[in-house]
């Protein structure tokens, strides 16, 4: 790792150590992005239906992205692969073969002047993926971040660990798609009730409870009820 790159990494670490709230963290990461020739930064963690992030992208774009679940068609997320390191991207140099939905995604991003960037993938336990992206309004803006693969990945891992450990509650995420009744069902499960128990509490049938859980899994796009409860707890939709 070159001296100048190491010093810049150390500077970011020092700056973040002084950040005490969401606004300070965002300003620090924005400052780092600007010094490397980018306009925006974003941190996005994706684990099945549990998606959350921190960014200085325009607020309207952030809400549009999360509320419309654009992460499901985001070619940058699709390009994340354990065998692949950090990568640059743009609409003219996509990281994956373009499909119709990708073109729609780029068109949406272009409306907010997001045209190119560099993304650093991070892989956590049990299939969790995270992505640190520095983006630009220019058609090509890679700066020097792709010059040293090891230090770039180390940078991504550092930001991931820092943000997750200290600022989990600051993340932006899609609104809860579940009804109060559905959340109540998950809460009963969390506290040890069976489907039959919940049916008695609700004065309904076990089959009706199972049907509701099926709808919950579909809304959260998860495979089983354990995952649904896990997402609800992590997002603090239900409490222990």
Image: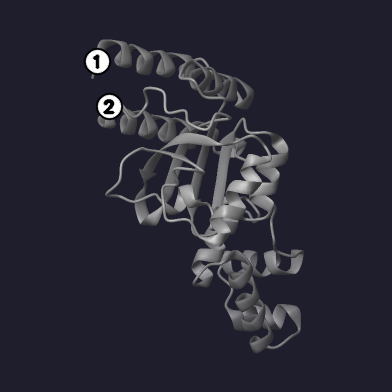
24 vs 44, left or right, is right
Sort mark 1 into few (<14), some (14-19) or many (20+) by Cα contacts within 10 Å: few
Report the Cα–Cα distance between label 2 and label 1: 9 Å
Instruction: Check if mark 2's residue and mark 1's residue have beta carbons within 8 Å.
Output: yes
Q: Quadrant of residue 237?
A: bottom right
46 vs 210, left or right, is left
**Height in image: 96 above or below 221?**
above
Q: Which mark is residue 2?
A: 1
Q: Which residue does the numbered mark 2 point to in the structure image?
A: 148
Residue name at image x 50 percent, y 31 percent:
166
Q: Quadrant of residue 172?
A: top right
Image quadrant containing the N terminus: top left
Front in this rendered view, residue 230 or 72: 72
Most distant residue in the left direction: 1
Kindly tell me whether residue 27 is visible in this rendering: yes
Kindly tell me whether residue 191 is visible in this rendering: no
**Height in image: 144 above or below 104?**
above
Q: Position of residue 88 (x, y in %)?
A: 41, 37
Q: Position of residue 104 (x, y in %)?
A: 61, 54
Residue name at image x 53 percent, y 17 percent:
31
Image quadrant containing the C terminus: bottom right
Q: Position of residue 125 (x, y in %)?
A: 35, 51
């Amino acid at each position: 790792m070159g001296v100048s790159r190491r010093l810049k990494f150390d500077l970011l670490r020092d700056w973040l150590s002084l950040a005490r709230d969401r606004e300070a963290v965002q300003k620090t990461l924005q400052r780092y992005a600007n010094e490397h020739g980018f306009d925006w930064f974003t941190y996005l963690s994706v684990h099945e239906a549990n998606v959350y992030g921190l960014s200085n992208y325009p607020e309207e774009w952030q809400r549009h992205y999360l509320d419309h679940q654009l992460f499901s068609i985001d070619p940058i997320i699709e390009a994340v692969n354990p065998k692949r390191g950090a990568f640059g991207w743009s609409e003219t140099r996509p990281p994956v073969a373009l499909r119709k939905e990708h073109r729609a995604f780029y068109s949406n991003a272009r409306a907010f002047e997001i045209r190119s960037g560099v993304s650093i993938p991070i892989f956590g336990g049990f299939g969790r993926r995270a992505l640190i992206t520095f983006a630009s309004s220019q058609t090509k803006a890679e700066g020097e971040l792709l010059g040293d693969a090891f230090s770039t990945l180390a940078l991504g891992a550092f930001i991931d660990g820092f943000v997750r450990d200290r600022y989990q509650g600051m993340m932006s995420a899609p609104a809860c798609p579940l009804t109060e009744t559905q959340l109540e069902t998950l809460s009963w499960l969390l506290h040890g009730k069976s489907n039959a128990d919940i049916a008695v509490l609700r004065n309904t049938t076990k089959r009706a409870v199972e049907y509701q859980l099926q709808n919950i899994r579909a809304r959260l796009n998860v495979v089983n009820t354990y995952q649904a409860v896990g997402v609800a707890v992590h997002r603090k939709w239900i409490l222990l």
